[in-house]
Image (tube, rainbow, N blue to C red):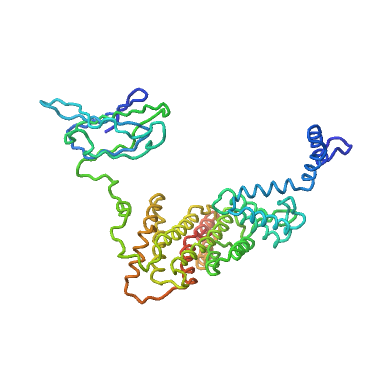
Amino acid sequence: MGVLVWGIPALLWGVLVWGMPLPVQEIVFKNFYTAFLSVRVQRPGPSGSRRWVTSLRDLCLMPCPHTEQGAQDYFSLHRNQMLCDMDQVTAVRFILRQPSPVWLQFSIEELQIFPPGQKSPQKDFPSWLSQLTPPEQPASLHGLPDPEKVSTEVQQMWVLTEVIRTRQAAARIGRFDVSSTILLRASAWLHCQGSLPEGLLLAGWGFGVSL
Amino acid sequence: PAAGPVPAVTPKMAAYEKRRAGTAPSGGQAVGSEAEFLLRSGVTAMVREALLKVLEARPEEPVSFLADYFERLVLGGPAATGDAAAEPTGPPQRLARALWYVSLAHHSHRTAFDSNTGAAYEVLGGGGRRRAAGVDGRLYSELLRSICQHGEAPAEAAAALLRRVRCRDHEAVPFDVFRYGVLTCFVLLEFAAKADALFAVLDGGSGAADARVCQAVLRALEEALGFGHVTQPRRYLEAGSRLGPDGLALAMDRALQERKLSGSMSREEFLKKATALFVAKVKPVE
């Protein structure tokens, strides 16, 4: 499957065609400076013909087309949002519009179309994201230190640790740490291999000494 | 230096002449001599330098910052007046000057902090008269130790941190390692101050807090710090949810529900445990 895109500035069409009719549950994509999106789907009509039906009309992806908002967001279109039935789809056409002259190029990327059984990966949210307030609340805050204040301090402590993490030193001292056993082994090895050419001796050292 | 054999006007005289010529038609002699005096006595350069330092550091209390700045200028010796770049001579002076440089700007003013650290590195390294000796492990450790002492860090935590970022006495310390070492010391000071403030909230002014609650809060922090392996935005969100008021209230409440022997935790013990969490996250110098 591939997206065929042709068009004139400010309007792009892309068509996605597959052979047999398939149900569509969800369409996921990443926007790239498209302001409005319309989707038309091709479905089998009466007596073997195929009809194009509009399933989404001018969905606004960028609230203000001249500015950055929404320009690179991920979007998920669920079948409930569609204007028509999505059970038997043989092709999808994407119509992209960008009225603003600011953006020379626009498209949609990472397009994925999911059949009903398959869950889009974005749905596997960790619990902390899907439940912004924890399901269980403490019975009473009586006797507890003020959670707001505790949280402020603890978060600042966390941030300070994060500072250390993000501003780590890239340089190394380049220390030679030669543990005594390895040194012993290396010297024994050198002793045995004393008659070998120099290159091999050096290789032996490279092995015995840990940087 | 002029090209001719005859000694030409010195730069100072030239500046004076120029200034006089420039001001004579409009302002007269008085203005010229005032400006000339400021220039000659080095006040112009000194004040400019001080203003630059204030702009760099953006201190919360500019007056005390400036007072401190000028005090150090005076302490730095008569040669230092008007020129902060004057070379201090002995190792103790160099150490004091380096300590002064690194404490000028807060580490969150990243550019200023890094440039001050660079200046400190140069001051420490510029030992001998003829050659720049560079910073070795001994000077570096001494500077870190004095930063911790100066900021009154908990001794045990400071020692643990120094063990982690120290270099051996004979080793040449690259600037990046030096910067990281200095940064970790300053962050440790701030971390200890925050931990202290946290304990003040936990004990409610009584001097000893419930050990279970303290443990629960520290555990929550430790768990949030444990997300080091996941990618950045997710790590922030994850920590934010765990360390939010809701999450912490729940953790503290659970800790209090436990039917365990309820002891108390002293400030020192709490600080020790908290700073240990921090020190464990510092990347050791290798």
Residue B243 pos. (x, y %): 39, 58
Q: Is residue B87 left or right of residue A38?
A: right
Q: How many numbered marks have been drawn onto this rendered protein structure?
A: 0
Residue drawn at x 86%, y 35% as measured from the top left: B4
- Image quarter (top left, top right, bottom left or bottom right) of the N terminus of chain A: top left
Residue drawn at x 44%, y 69% as measured from the top left: B203
Residue drawn at x 51%, y 56% as measured from the top left: A203
Residue A144 visible: yes
- Quadrant location of residue A86? top left
Q: Is residue A59 left or right of residue B183?
A: left
Q: Is residue A45 left or right of residue B206?
A: left
Residue A13 pos. (x, y %): 30, 27
Looking at this view, name the residue that lies furthest to the top.
Answer: A8
Residue B227 pos. (x, y %): 39, 57
Q: Is residue A124 left or right of residue B196?
A: left
Looking at this view, name the residue that lies furthest to the left.
Answer: A47
Residue A106 pos. (x, y %): 37, 30
Q: Judge by depth and name the residue closer to the eye, A145 or A83.
A: A145
Q: Judge by depth and name the residue closer to the eye, A99 or B206.
A: B206
Residue B1 visible: no
